[in-house]
Image (tube, rainbow, N blue to C red):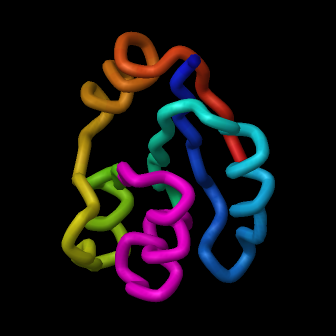
Amino acid sequence: MRSKLFLLLKSPREFHALEEMEAIAGEADRAAVLLNDAALFATQEGRLEELLQVCPEVFVMKDDLQARGLDPCPGVVEIDYHQLVELIMDEYDQTVTL
């Protein structure tokens, strides 16, 4: 079973691919990284809960939150670019950008 890391770029308002993420991941371990406007997922409890059902581990870029003046909900791990590279290169077998 291969692990998958999803890189999300769109805001919760524009992103409607949770079912596709589930299908792509199959039985694989999975996580999501929230980049750019997707960082808003980390601040909206309802949408975050939906995402956590698909990806039990959710990371958000600190810089993207700070640029928007936001704080994440509990359960979201803030990361920097160095940690993002480690996730992509060392922790997960495949990376999917949506």
In the image, taking residue 19 as reference, residue 68 lies left or right, namely left
Q: In which quarter of the image is residue 80?
A: top left
Q: Quadrant of the N terminus?
A: top right
Q: Residue at x 20, y 72 (%)?
A: 74
Residue 95 coordinates in the image, percent (x, y): 60, 27
Q: Which residue is drawn at 28% across and 78% down?
A: 70
Magenta part mainly helix, strand or loop?
helix
In this view, the residue in front, 68 or 59, is 59
Q: In which quarter of the image is residue 49?
A: bottom left
In the image, taking residue 9 as reference, residue 83 lies left or right, namely left
With respect to residue 18, does 63 lie above or below? above
With respect to residue 59, does 51 lie above or below? below
Q: Which residue is drawn at 40% across and 53% down?
A: 56
In the image, taking residue 25 as reference, residue 30 lies left or right, namely left
All told, the count of numbered labels is: 0
Residue 16 coordinates in the image, percent (x, y): 76, 70
Boundaries of the magenta span: 37-58
Residue 37 coordinates in the image, percent (x, y): 55, 66
Q: In which quarter of the image is residue 11?
A: bottom right
Please check the rendered image and state whether residue 56 is part of the magenta-colored stretch, yes or no: yes
In the image, taking residue 65 as reference, residue 24 lies left or right, namely right
Q: Residue at x 70, y 62 (%)?
A: 18
Please check the rendered image and state whether residue 66 is part of the magenta-colored stretch, yes or no: no
